[in-house]
Amino acid sequence: MIRVRGEGDLGVCVELLRAVHERAGYPINWPADPRGWLTPEDRLGCWVAVSGGRVVGHVVLTGVGDGAEVERLFVDPEAMGQGIGRRLLEHCVTTAAGLGRELALEVVDNRGAAVHLYRRAGWREVRRTAIDWGGEHASELIRFVAPGTELAGSDRS
């Protein structure tokens, strides 16, 4: 089940993010303020995936100009392979479409499982940008646009 992230979910989400960071290296650099990082000012919505009564995934949709971006998408390592990431991603696609916004996302080049998820879901890679903040863990940021997104709108920064 996907639902709006409540204030009471934030602590659990930080704990889950810590587990994801330690086991899967996301995010590459641990945020100084994880609660703030999970709640960006330009958010259009924050959601959690719940299974068996516990939070097992998280995603944020942010507004960028007249478009939208999928951010802070992660799934409990213990719940991987159950389609949770795909459902969170689809929730963002539906929400952005309802708002009339083109949707994109960016992921570092060391996130093999994430890249595979986006490609399987029909997202298209449109750009790679060199980064200097990934250290030895990542060297490029890959930009994807959602299925049905016009290529012309994909070049927003």
Image: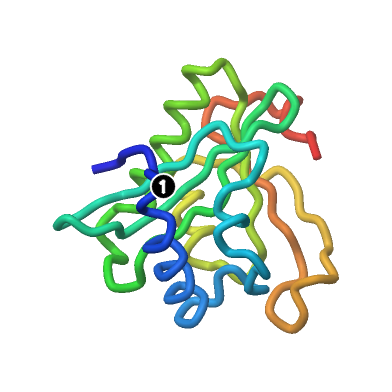
Of the pair 117 and 105, the residue shown nearer to us: 105
Q: Who's the residue at 68% across and 79% down the image?
A: 137
Q: Who's the residue at 65% across and 31% down the image?
A: 63
Quadrant of the rendered image containing residue 38: bottom right
> Which scheme is used to colour this image of the protein?
rainbow
Quadrant of the rendered image containing residue 70: top right
Residue on which the image places disc 1:
7
Q: Who's the residue at 23% across and 43% down the image?
A: 1
Give the x, y percent position of residue 50.
Answer: 25, 51
Say what amino acid the circle numbered 1 marks. Answer: Glu
Q: Quadrant of the C terminus?
A: top right
Q: Is residue 138 above or below residue 136?
A: above
Give the crowd class for mark 1: few <14, some 14-19, many >=20 residues within 10 Å: few
Q: Is residue 54 above or below residue 132?
A: above
Instruction: Answer left or right for 87 relative to 89.
Output: left
Give the x, y percent position of residue 93.
Answer: 47, 31
Instruction: Answer left or right for 22 relative to 127.
Output: left
Give the x, y percent position of residue 94.
Answer: 42, 27
Label 1, secondary structure: give it: helix
Give the x, y percent position of residue 17.
Answer: 47, 67
Q: Who's the residue at 65% across and 68% down the image?
A: 31
The single residue placed furthest to the front in the displayed view is: 8
